[in-house]
């Protein structure tokens, strides 16, 4: 998702420059909302003054417990691992057979136990209430919540 500022429709809308601190705060707000590319533009000319890129896998995610809640992304097992909030975390949760998305849209990356030649596999994105049963043991390598 990219955010840009529109050019004003008339010269009556042209005003004073916004203080740099206010621009930086607006950029931070857009990035916190999930924008991965934010452009600062001259609203009169439309000229792009600067582009700020946020890594697509910034970490805001939070692990619960160990344990899961009824609304968290949950990787059951002993112990269970639950996650909330948007972001990505690299992990190594071994010998699991499923995960559920809780109230979130989520995705995991995993390796198949005993099959290193397959490398890391990205599971299909799951919406709220979704989940995946793997059919054999896997090691969860990454959890991403959208």
Image (spheres, grey):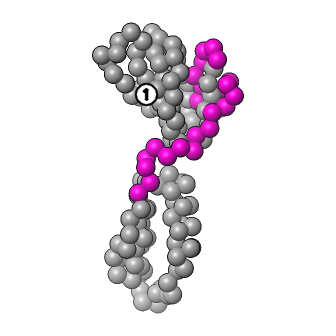
Quadrant of the rendered structure where residue 135 is? top left
Q: Where's residue 73, x and y in %?
A: 59, 30
Magenta segment range? 53-79
Describe the element under mark 1 as helix, strand or loop.
strand
Q: Where's residue 66, x and y in %?
A: 67, 25
Quadrant of the rendered structure where residue 111 is? top left
Number of other residues with Cα within 10 Å of mark 1, as a class: few under 14, some 14 to 19, many 20 or more: some
Q: How many numbered circles are shown?
A: 1
**Is 17 on the left or on the right of 73, as rendered?**
left
Is 118 included in the stretch rendered in magenta? no
Quadrant of the rendered structure where residue 78 is? top right
Task: Classify 109 as above or below 24.
Answer: above
Which residue occupies the foreground of this view, 100 or 17?
17
Residue at left 43%, top 47%?
56
Residue at left 56%, top 61%?
29
Task: Classify 107 as above or below 111.
Answer: below
Residue at left 55%, top 54%?
32
Q: Is any atom of residue 126 visible in this view? A: no
Residue at left 42%, top 62%?
52
Q: Is any atom of residue 29 visible in this view? A: yes
**Is 23 on the left or on the right of 5, as rendered?**
right
Q: Where's residue 145, x and y in %?
A: 52, 38
**Is 146 on the left or on the right of 53, as rendered?**
right
Which residue occupies the foreground of this view, 116 or 40?
116
Q: State the residue lying farthest toward the left.
A: 117
Q: Where's residue 107, x and y in %?
A: 47, 31
Residue ID for mark 1 = 109
The chief SS type of the magenta part is loop
């Amino acid at each position: 998702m990219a955010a840009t500022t529109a050019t004003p429709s008339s010269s009556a809308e042209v005003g004073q420059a916004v203080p740099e601190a206010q621009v930086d705060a607006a950029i931070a707000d857009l990035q916190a909302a999930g924008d991965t590319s934010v452009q600062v533009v001259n609203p009169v000319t439309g000229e792009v003054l600067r582009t700020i890129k946020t890594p697509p896998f910034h970490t805001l995610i939070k692990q619960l417990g160990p344990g899961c809640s009824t609304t968290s992304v949950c990787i059951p097992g002993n112990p269970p691992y639950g996650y909330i909030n948007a972001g990505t975390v690299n992990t190594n949760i071994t010998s699991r057979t499923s995960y559920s998305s809780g109230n979130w849209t989520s995705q995991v990356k995993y390796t198949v136990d005993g099959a290193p030649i397959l490398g890391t596999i990205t599971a299909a994105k799951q919406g709220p209430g979704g989940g995946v049963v793997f059919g054999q043991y896997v090691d969860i390598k990454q959890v991403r919540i959208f």
